[in-house]
Structure formats: structure tokens, C-alpha cells
Image (cartoon, rainbow, N blue to C red):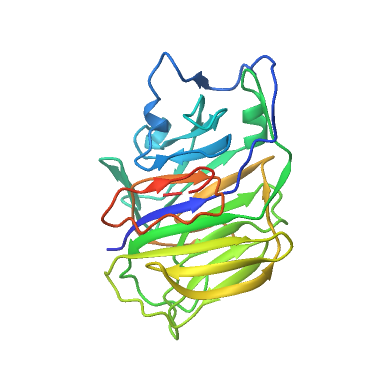
């Protein structure tokens, strides 16, 4: 059994806020008088430093065919989320390939994906929040905590923890893998179609680790750095700013969308896609995670 708590931080800023009527198709709820919807509650504390959005999958609310409901929530101010949009996801797998219990999802060959047009959904709010089709982010953080015991593989893209794939499939997505290869053990991340690989890591089966990749730097040269329990494994550069497509795509949990046979066996307790500001969250296996938004996916 492999247990994973994954955090993927996506750089997602709101470029403008203006007033208009909400689109009738948007399942939108404003914060204030009502409690935060169950689908939008996070175990991770999100403390925004700038307005922006976060995508949450906490396995606390379900729709048709026992598929989880995700939440796209907007921070118009840095103090608390102000708007909530429920996003239906799909569970793929037969039998016990994906099961849910007590706010956790266990995977054994299946996966979850959530299709969403972030730009469209945010523009449908009242008043709308406007983001561009493609946003360029110098800072981006992906963190995962997990204990692995799966069979060694020859594929460098096995053990996918989380991935975002734009609807324009010719555009590369971004994601985090922790493959246990037949000839080496690796931490692997991908941004803009470029892989960052730390090899021959001292990974042991069934032992929890915190895996982190940071994309940061600037103003002209960016790097990607891998950490294992806060120790640097390797730094890669120069790199380009992360290009994130808000105008349609899907969040894939527990699978590589370019090869749906590449899945993992394990358990997730929460997933948050959320904007980073260059800070890296501390190791949180034994302490509460504090996410500074723009910052983390747990």
C-alpha cells in the first residue's frame, strides 16, 4: 500500500476584477452570510498574500456515480475566499480501483479527473474575475508526501501524483512524478514540456517522504529545485516561466493523462491547486500544513 498526501501549487493570479452579472450556468456561491460549502473546505490553511483562485478536491462531497465534487474558489481579498463554484469530477476505474472513505480517496489502478475552464468560470461570477487565456508565472511549487511500496518500473512517468493538462493537447502540461525505476529511483517534475530529474535518490519503500519541486528565480533566469524532506536533491536551469492555460483543461489525479495506464496505488486526503509566491511550505508530516496563497496542492 502506498499512502500519498500530494500538494501541487499552481501560479494563478487574477489580473482584473470588474462588475457584471453572473452567468446562469455557474454554480456560484458567495461567502459571508453562509458557511463555506463542504466541497470547498480544506485541511490546509490557505493564507493569501494576493487575490487569486484555488482549486480544491477534498473528497467530502459527491455527485452522480459516486464521483467527487471539486471546488474552484476565488479570493477577491487576501483574508478569506469570497466565491465558490462547484466542479463535478469523474472517477475512472472498476471495482475497488478508486474508493472513498472518511474524506480520503484510495487508488488501485483508477484515477480522477476534473475538467474545468477556469477563465470562463471566473468570468461568470458576479462581479466577474478576469484572467487571460494564458498566464506566465515565474514561481510554481509542487509538494507531495507519501510512502511508496509499488513495483519498480522502467517508465520514468510512472507514479504520477498530479498533473494539469490544457485542453489544447499539443501544449505540454505540468506535473509531479516519483517513479521507482528498475535502474534508479527518481524525483521528476515537468514544466513547459521540460523534465527535471533527480536520480539515484535514497528512497525506501513504505517510508513517508516530503517531495518538493520549486520553480523560481528571476527576473530573467529561472530554476527548478527538487527537495527530499527539505534537503536539496538537485537544481536545474535555466528554465522559462511556467505557462498556465486557464481557458480549458483538466486536473488529473493519480494518472498521467498522456498514458492512462500509468497510475499509482495509494491514498490522497486532499488536493489543492493554488498560486505560489516563491515561498516553500515546511515539512508537514507531523505538523499542520500552512499554505500561503498564492502557494500550494495537498
Q: Position of residue 68 (x, y in %)?
A: 41, 37
Looking at the image, can residue 117 be seen?
no
- Comparing 175 with 210, the one in front is 210
Q: Position of residue 169 (x, y in %)?
A: 69, 53
Q: Is residue 148 above or below residue 297?
A: below
Q: Residue at point 71% right, 66% down? A: 221
**Quadrant where the N terminus is found in the figure:** bottom left
- Comparing 66 with 3, the one in front is 3
* Left or right, 236 with reference to 92: right
Q: Residue at point 62% right, 16% down? A: 24
Q: Residue at point 69% right, 40% down? A: 247
Q: Position of residue 112 (x, y in %)?
A: 45, 47
Looking at the image, can residue 283 be seen?
yes
* Left or right, 151 with reference to 117: left
Q: Is residue 66 above or below residue 188?
A: above
Q: Residue at point 45% right, 72% down? A: 179
Amino acid at each position: 500500500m502506498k499512502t500519498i498526501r500530494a500538494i501541487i501549487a499552481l501560479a494563478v493570479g487574477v489580473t482584473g476584477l470588474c462588475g457584471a452579472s453572473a452567468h446562469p450556468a455557474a454554480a456560484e456561491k458567495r461567502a459571508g452570510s453562509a458557511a463555506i460549502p463542504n466541497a470547498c473546505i480544506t485541511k490546509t490553511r490557505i493564507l493569501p498574500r494576493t487575490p487569486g483562485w484555488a482549486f480544491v478536491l477534498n473528497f467530502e462531497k459527491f455527485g452522480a456515480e459516486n464521483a467527487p465534487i471539486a471546488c474552484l474558489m476565488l479570493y477577491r481579498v487576501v483574508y478569506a475566499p469570497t466565491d465558490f463554484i462547484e466542479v463535478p469530477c469523474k472517477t475512472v476505474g472498476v471495482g475497488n480501483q478508486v474508493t472513498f472513505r472518511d474524506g480520503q480517496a484510495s487508488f488501485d489502478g483508477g484515477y480522477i479527473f476534473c475538467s474545468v475552464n477556469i477563465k470562463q468560470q471566473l468570468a461568470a461570477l458576479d462581479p466577474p474575475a478576469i484572467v487571460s487565456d494564458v498566464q506566465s508565472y515565474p514561481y510554481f511549487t509542487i509538494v507531495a508526501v507519501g510512502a511508496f511500496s509499488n513495483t519498480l518500473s522502467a517508465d520514468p512517468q510512472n507514479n504520477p501524483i498530479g498533473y494539469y493538462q490544457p485542453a489544447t493537447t499539443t501544449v505540454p502540461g505540468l506535473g509531479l512524478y516519483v517513479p521507482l525505476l528498475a535502474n534508479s529511483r527518481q524525483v521528476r517534475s515537468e514544466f513547459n514540456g521540460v523534465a527535471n530529474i533527480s536520480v539515484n535518490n535514497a528512497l525506501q519503500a513504505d517510508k513517508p517522504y516530503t517531495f518538493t519541486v520549486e520553480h523560481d528565480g528571476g527576473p530573467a533566469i529561472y530554476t527548478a529545485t527538487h527537495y527530499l524532506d527539505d534537503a536539496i536533491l538537485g537544481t536545474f536551469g535555466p528554465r522559462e516561466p511556467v505557462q498556465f492555460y486557464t481557458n480549458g483543461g483538466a486536473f488529473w489525479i493519480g494518472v498521467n493523462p498522456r498514458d492512462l495506464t500509468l497510475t499509482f496505488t495509494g491514498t490522497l486526503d486532499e488536493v489543492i491547486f493554488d498560486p505560489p509566491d516563491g515561498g516553500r511550505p515546511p515539512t508537514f508530516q507531523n505538523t499542520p500544513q500552512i499554505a500561503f496563497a498564492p502557494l500550494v496542492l495537498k
